[in-house]
Structures are given as structure tokens and as C-alpha cells.
Image (cartoon, helix red, strand yellow):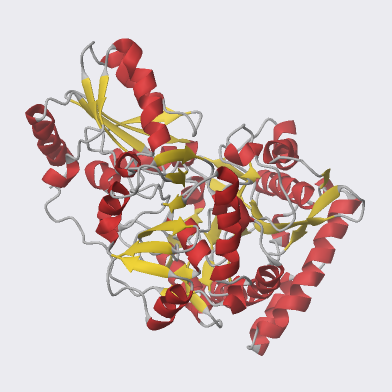
């Protein structure tokens, strides 16, 4: 079926169930950013594959709401269908609900699947619709009725995440979680987000592309705990690790009935921003609202994790050196290759490194105009051939058992124009300014974001995405709560503290021509001055010297680049086994 045929089936179900509009989100029952194929309802109904966006279907309109990162992709993927792209200027708002208020009559009914929406979101939607006498039916699963060939959930193996890499045992982590439960006066703590479960119980899986998580729920009691997961998924080491910590395994689908049977005199602590409405309703005990306990705990990397992070960046830098050495050889030899070929080469070179598992996200390899599509991912049937001319943007990362990487570099494949050099240098200056920042304890992401934008702003330029996001440790590459953004979202309001690993990635995009982004991961560490913090740049790969306009750089910026390149070569070169690649890499790490 094409998209318009799917819409016809959906509207038939809506009429049968007296539903005037449905809202279909990007998420799953665990409020994940990346979701398994089984739960990709929004992508299935609309054809839009970006990781963020919300669909609203009424009996006479079909719309997709997404933010500026996906405007170009949305226009391309919705073309030829009934869907209309609604551009969101604030990626954290919900203008699609306001749209329904403006376009539905009094007495209308909006349907949602309560498994796919967090309790807090459901309340917000209800509060917005109620003044217009529009009701919300949150037990409305219409997609399941029409998605005949829906993929099954993964049955892949779940493994133990060794203390050698985690730095803290399950017992140690449960002790901290239980202390927070005691402070809240809770008998149980309900974990619904997959990365929180993976971190707390030291387990890893492959149930979702790129993120090493296992589809599950966890309920932690004061002395024991329960993991709800499909039977047979846990390997022997993972099962033994759970049993040693008094954690009982249950079938994944048993979570609802288990919560139904709790003693009503007991209490359950949960986060209403991540617990689904359907699961929230199942709790037969007193509910205590609270923020996710593991969220901040896992955001602050421990000393063992930090040591591994520094090592994994050396391995990742070596993998990139081999990939980009191959790329230059192909270009020099006038050999034909595509964006997809480079994606495969990056994964192949990373896979040669010790403890590599898979990509940390779908690599963004955008040649020329494709680079201006911020979250572009090349596909074999539509990707561009890469030639020795123009600008190439490469954003990629790896999942290793000893860490997660995420790096972007922009290359010129021919002599760049002055405009290209200027814009690249403005982006580089912003990245350096944030890298060199010293700031007092208590500083938030929204306060730091302007450092990366200031040079572009001075020229009347900007970029439409955040400057940085938190990064997990062999876990989700996008990890809340911290980041660098120019708004007061969670990422903007979160205080940066030592141990947080965050991306630093300003960019510039000229639609139809090229995209530029430079990304390093930075670790928050104490500064020499008491009460102040700074960043340690841990990503290790040189910048394209051919794109730098030295005349725009200060002496301090030049010194920073030269010191960084020296540091990169010193720490990456021992991991480069090929002599020819090592010689080439030394040239790339030259001073300016």
C-alpha cells in the first residue's frame, strides 16, 4: 500500500470508532527516540523516517509536524502523498494540538494510543482540548487494526555489561536507587525507559537499531526487584547477574497485571514524563511522581568509564583515519563511489577495532546539497556519487563495549571558495570557543550555547539545531538531560557538572549547496580555579586545514588548533597499523 491508501484505511477505522482525529507520535511504549520496527507507526502511516515528528490525521487533513532539522527531509519524503508538512519553530512545543483546537468542532473526539504517550503528555493534551469541548480517547489503537504485516518484536540475546566497563556493579547502582526511593517514601520504583533499565541492571541488547538496549520494564523494590522481558532473551551471564541481585524475571507482557496486583497500601515512584498512560493506569498502588533517578546518575560518568572513553576515542580516530585515507585514494584515482559506500567503509573500519559492536546512529554522509539536510541518511537507490569537487559532511559514530562515539567532520574535495572557507571558519571558531570555555559551577546549557553561535551571528548567520546533546557510555548516543541549546528545554536548563559527556557541534547549512558541521565530544572537568569548570575535548581527529581561513583566527585559536592536532597524532597514531596511513595521518595533523 502507498501512503494515501493507508490513510483511507485509517479513516475508515476512525469512522467506525467515532474518532474525528488521531495523533500518532514517533515514540514507543518506553518513550524512546529510536524505536524498533514494530513500533514505527508514524513512519509507517506517513512515509517520513526522521527520528522526530508527530502525525495528525483528521477526516479531511493529514499533517506532519517536525522541527527545522527535518524540513528538507520532510518535504522530500512526503512528496506525492496527501500529507502536509507543518514546520515547527520550537521543537519542544505541541502545535499539532492547537491545530486540532482550531479545526475541530465542539464535541469532537481525538484518539491516541495510551501506550505511546507518556502520562504527562496525555494530561497536557487533555488540558488543551478541554476548553473547546473536545475530548480525548487514550485507549484508541487504530494502527494495529490496519497494519497487517507489522514486524515482530526482536528476540535478540541480552548480555551482561561487565563491571570492567561499567565501573559500578548492579548492587552498587541499586543501593543508590533505593536510597532515592527511601527519600521519596516509595516501596517500589517503576523503570520504563530502556536506557535507564540498561544502566541500572548492567544489561545491554540489540532490540533497537544503534542503541544497545533491551525491550523491557523493571520494578525495583526495597529488597528485591523484577525485570519484565521476553522469555529466553537473557544469556547465562545476564541471568546469573540478575539472580545474584534478587531480581526475578517475568514475561514482558506481564507488567500490566503485576502492577494491577500491587497492594493498594503500597506506593510506586515513577516519572510521569516517561511512563505511558496505559501503564500509569495499571498501577494499583499509591503513585508518587518523581524525575528519573538513573537519568542524572548515568549522565555523570565514573572514573572507570572516563578512562575507557579516552581510550575508545583513540581507536575511533584510527578507524576514521583508515576510512578517510581510503576515501582520498578513491578520489585521487578517479574511482567511483557513493555516499552509501562511504557509510559502509566507516562501519567496516570501526569493526576492525577491538570491542566494536555497531554504529551509534545511522551515519550522515551528505555530499554537496545533501549535506544541507541536517539529519540526512543516504539510501542506495537515491544517494549521490562522491566526486573530487565540492563539500562533504560526514557525521558518524560507533558503539563499543568500552564507550560510545559521535563525530562530525566537513571536508572540501576541491579548492574551496572564499565563502566556503569563511563559513567553515566561523563554525570552527564557535566550536573552539565552547571547547575553551571556563565557567562557574551551576552554569547551564542555555548559558553556554551562545559561545558556539557568536561568530555566525556576527555575520547574520545561524543554525537551526541545538549545539550539543549528552552522550551515553555504550548506551544511547543522545542521552539527556544535559546539552547546549538556545532555549529553556531540559537540555537548556540542566546544570553541567564534572563527568558529563556532551557533543559540541555547531554548523552552517546552505540549502541546495552544502552543509558544514564540526563535532567533538567534550567532558566536563574541574578547572584549576576553585569553583570553576571547563571542558576536556576527548574526540580525536584533525580538521580540514584546506577549509580554514587563517586570517580570521586569533593567535589563541591557532594555538588551540595546533595543540589539538599534536594531541590527536600522539594518541591516535599508535592505533594505526598501516605505515602509509600513519604517514598520511601525520600530514593531516599538521600545524597551521
Residue 46 image point, x, y percent: 26, 41
Q: Is residue 42 left or right of residue 193?
A: left
Position above or below: 147 against 356: above
Pick the front one: 390 or 182:
182
Q: Is residue 514 left or right of residue 79?
A: right
Q: Residue at x 66, y 57 (%)?
A: 300
Q: Residue at x 36, y 26 (%)?
A: 125
The answer to whether residue 389 is seen in the rendering is no
Residue 274 image point, x, y percent: 43, 44
The answer to whether residue 65 is seen in the rendering is yes
Q: Is residue 315 left or right of residue 526?
A: left
Pick the front one: 300 or 5:
300
Pick the front one: 194 or 461:
194
Q: Residue at x 68, y 65 (%)?
A: 302
Name the image quarter holding the C terminus: bottom right
Residue reaching furthest front? Answer: 265
Position above or below: 198 against 241: above
Residue 79 image point, x, y percent: 28, 38
Pick the front one: 276 or 174:
174
How many marks the image carries: the answer is 0
Residue 343 image point, x, y percent: 45, 67
Amino acid at each position: 500500500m502507498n501512503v494515501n491508501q493507508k490513510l483511507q484505511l485509517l479513516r475508515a477505522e476512525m469512522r467506525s470508532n467515532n474518532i474525528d482525529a488521531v495523533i500518532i507520535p514517533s515514540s514507543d511504549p518506553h518513550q524512546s527516540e529510536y524505536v524498533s520496527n514494530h513500533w514505527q507507526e508514524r513512519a509507517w502511516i506517513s512515509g517520513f523516517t526522521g527520528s522526530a515528528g508527530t502525525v495528525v490525521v483528521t477526516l479531511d487533513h493529514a499533517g506532519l509536524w517536525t522541527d527545522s532539522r527535518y524540513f528538507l527531509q520532510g518535504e522530500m519524503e512526503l512528496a506525492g502523498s496527501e500529507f502536509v508538512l507543518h514546520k515547527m519553530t520550537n521543537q519542544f512545543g505541541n502545535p499539532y494540538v492547537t491545530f486540532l483546537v482550531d479545526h475541530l468542532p465542539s464535541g469532537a473526539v481525538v484518539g491516541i494510543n495510551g501506550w505511546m504517550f507518556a502520562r504527562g503528555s496525555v494530561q497536557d493534551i487533555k488540558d488543551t482540548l478541554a476548553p473547546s469541548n473536545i475530548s480525548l480517547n487514550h485507549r484508541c489503537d487504530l494502527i494495529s487494526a490496519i497494519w497487517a504485516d507489522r514486524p515482530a518484536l526482536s528476540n535478540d540475546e541480552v548480555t551482561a555489561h561487565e563491571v570492567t566497563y561499567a565501573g559500578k556493579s548492579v548492587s552498587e547502582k541499586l543501593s543508590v536507587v533505593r536510597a532515592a526511593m527511601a527519600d521519596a517514601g516509595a516501596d517500589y520504583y517503576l523503570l520504563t525507559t530502556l536506557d535507564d533499565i540498561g544502566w541500572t541492571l548492567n544489561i545491554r541488547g540489540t532490540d533497537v537499531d544503534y542503541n544497545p538496549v533491551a525491550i523491557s520494564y523493571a520494578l525495583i523494590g526495597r529488597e528485591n526487584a523484577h525485570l519484565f522481558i521476553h522469555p529466553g532473551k537473557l544469556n547465562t551471564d545476564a541471568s546469573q547477574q540478575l539472580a545474584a541481585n534478587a531480581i526475578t524475571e517475568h514475561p514482558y507482557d506481564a507488567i500490566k497485571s503485576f502492577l494491577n496486583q500491587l497492594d493498594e497500601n503500597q506506593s510506586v515512584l515513577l516519572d510521569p514524563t516517561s511512563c505511558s498512560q496505559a501503564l500509569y493506569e495499571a498501577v494499583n498502588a499509591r503513585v508518587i511522581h518523581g524525575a528519573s533517578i538513573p537519568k542524572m546518575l548515568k549522565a555523570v560518568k565514573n572514573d572507570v568509564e572516563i578512562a575507557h572513553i579516552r581510550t575508545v576515542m583513540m581507536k575511533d580516530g584510527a578507524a576514521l583515519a583508515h576510512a578517510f585515507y581510503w576515501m582520498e585514494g578513491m578520489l585521487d584515482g578517479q574511482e567511483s563511489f557513493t555516499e552509501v559506500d562511504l557509510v559502509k567503509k566507516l562501519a567496516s573500519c570501526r569493526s576492525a577495532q577491538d570491542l566494536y559492536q555497531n554504529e551509534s546512529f545511522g551515519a550522515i554522509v551528505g555530499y554537496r546539497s545533501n549535506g544541507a539536510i541536517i539529519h540526512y541518511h543516504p539510501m542506495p537507490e537515491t544517494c549521490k556519487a562522491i566526486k573530487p569537487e565540492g563539500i562533504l559532511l560526514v557525521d558518524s559514530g560507533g558503539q563499543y563495549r568500552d564507550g560510545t562515539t559521535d563525530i562530525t567532520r566537513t571536508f572540501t574535495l576541491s579548492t574551496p571558495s572564499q565563502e566556503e572557507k569563511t563559513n567553515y571558519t566561523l563554525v570552527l571558531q564557535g566550536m573552539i570557543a565552547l571547547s575553551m570555555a571556563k565557567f562557574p559551577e551551576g552554569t547551564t546549557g542555555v548559558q553556554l550555547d551562545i559561545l558556539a553561535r557568536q561568530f555566525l551571528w556576527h555575520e547574520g548567520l545561524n543554525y537551526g539545531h541545538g549545539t550539543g546533546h549528552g552522550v551515553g557510555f555504550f548506551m544511547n548516543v543522545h542521552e539527556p538531560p544535559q546539552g547546549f541549546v538556545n532555549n529553556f528545554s531540559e537540555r537548556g536548563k540542566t546544570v553541567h557538572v564534572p563527568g558529563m559527556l556532551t557533543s559540541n557541534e555547531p554548523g552552517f547549512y546552505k540549502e541546495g549547496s552544502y552543509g558544514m558541521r564540526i563535532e567533538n565530544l567534550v567532558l566536563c572537568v574541574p578547572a584549576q580555579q576553585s569553583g570553576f569548570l571547563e571542558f576536556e575535548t576527548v574526540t580525536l581527529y584533525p580538521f580540514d586545514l584546506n577549509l580554514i581561513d587563517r586570517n580570521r583566527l586569533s593567535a589563541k585559536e591557532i594555538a588551540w588548533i595546533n595543540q589539538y592536532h599534536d594531541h590527536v597524532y600522539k594518541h591516535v597514531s599508535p592505533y594505526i597499523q598501516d605505515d602509509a596511513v600513519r604517514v598520511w595521518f601525520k600530514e593531516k595533523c599538521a600545524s597551521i
